Image (tube, rainbow, N blue to C red):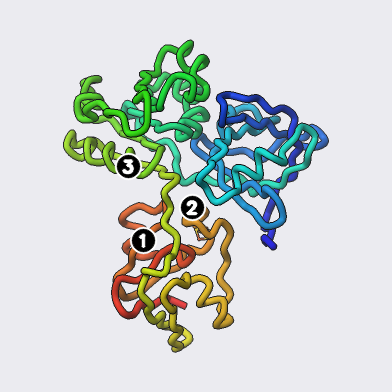
């Protein structure tokens, strides 16, 4: 069972089918009170049921304190959470959420922004656009999708006139030269924000580096969970002077729990950062979807990260 920390009880007020596989769910307080505030780019943990927790970006307007919206793609090849959500979420159902958290905020500068979305990675940008328009901050949004029919929010974005659509027309279609694309605006000091699958994030990150633009991302999908090919290793706990063996195929989190070490955790997929732990020595194979390089130099996420050396030392 999932432990509920500070949570927000909401009711589903409206469900809107955006594409064949994506629906938008609008949630509000059961008694009509204001919901906790959030900033553009924030997400919530959604308790799909007693055992399933998933993270979704808020795609509503942060200035509207009476509703949250999330858009969820039913992932046929996923872990089952989005399928369960689509199958069980109905208007009138109560849904428990975490407080909003933001790992993908707007950068606190006034540089122009190049926003790059891949598929359902469009969602965090929807909460940003209103803020960018209100503050008249220059931005361009590039939206990569397989085709027009799969592009959620297509009509609203097209009407807004700031979105460049790029349709691949099928699996793995050609992706336009990203250096040309990001450079086309002619902004020498723009900040690039990208949300999408890992391959897009990597390609956009490389293009941003070539152009000398600062880069920030949020990834989803393609999370590699612990598998049997991951070799075993030892976790040394510096403060309690204990060694704990992590056998091949077991997560560091589960080995620590079995040894009686209490570690807070939620998503167990490298995205909520609840299990984030400081490490002191060892070589880490980071698999979280959130941390920057500087954070990764100090912290790991034991739910998904593994060890590239024989031993790793945690500050526990
Ligand atoms: S439990 Fe969410 S990142 Fe580890």
Looking at the image, is 237 positioned above or below residue 23? below
Secondary structure of the residue carrying tag 3 is helix
Question: Which of marks 3 and 2 precedes in the sequence?
Answer: 3
> In the displayed image of the protein, which residue is found farthest to the right?
31
Q: How far across and how far down the image is residue 187, in percent?
A: 23, 24
Provide the residue designation for mark 1: 286
The reply, left or right, for residue 287 in relation to residue 27 is left
Q: How far across and how far down the image is residue 162, in percent?
A: 40, 16
What label sits on residue 199 in the rendered view? 3
Provide the residue designation for mark 2: 271
C-alpha gap between disc 3 and disc 1: 16 Å
At a point 41% along the width and 80% down the height, the residue shown is: 235
The reply, left or right, for residue 29 in relation to residue 187 is right
Question: Which of marks 1 and 3 precedes in the sequence?
Answer: 3
Label 2 within 8 A of ligand 1 by Cβ: yes
C-alpha gap between disc 2 and disc 3: 17 Å
């Amino acid at each position: 069972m999932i432990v509920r920390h500070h949570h927000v009880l909401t009711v589903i007020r409206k469900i809107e089918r955006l594409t064949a596989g994506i629906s938008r769910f609008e949630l509000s307080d059961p008694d009509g009170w204001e919901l906790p505030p959030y900033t553009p780019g924030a997400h919530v943990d959604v308790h799909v049921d007693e055992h399933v927790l998933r993270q979704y970006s808020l795609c509503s307007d942060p200035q509207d304190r009476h509703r949250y919206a999330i858009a969820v793609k039913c992932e046929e090849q996923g872990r089952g959470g989005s399928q369960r959500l689509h199958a069980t979420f109905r208007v009138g159902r109560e849904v428990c959420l975490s407080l909003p958290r933001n790992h993908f905020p707007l950068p606190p500068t006034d540089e122009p922004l190049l926003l790059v979305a891949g598929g359902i990675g469009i969602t965090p940008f929807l909460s940003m656009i209103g803020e960018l328009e209100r503050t008249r901050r220059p931005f361009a949004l590039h939206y990569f999708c397989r085709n027009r029919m799969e592009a959620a929010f297509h009509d609203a974005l097209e009407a807004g006139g700031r979105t460049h659509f790029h349709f691949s027309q099928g699996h793995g279609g050609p992706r336009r030269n990203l250096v040309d694309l990001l450079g086309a605006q002619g902004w020498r000091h723009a900040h690039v924000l990208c949300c999408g699958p890992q391959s897009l994030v990597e390609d956009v990150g490389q293009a941003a580096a070539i152009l000398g633009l600062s880069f920030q991302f949020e990834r989803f999908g393609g999370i590699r969970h612990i598998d049997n090919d991951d070799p075993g290793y030892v976790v040394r706990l510096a403060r309690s002077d204990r060694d704990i063996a992590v056998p091949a195929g077991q997560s560091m989190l589960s080995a620590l729990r079995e040894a009686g070490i209490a570690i807070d955790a939620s998503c167990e997929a490298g995205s909520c950062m609840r299990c984030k732990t400081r490490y002191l020595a060892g070589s880490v194979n980071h698999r979280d979807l959130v941390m920057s390089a500087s954070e990764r130099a100090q912290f790991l996420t034991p739910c998904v990260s593994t060890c590239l050396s024989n031993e790793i030392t945690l500050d526990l």
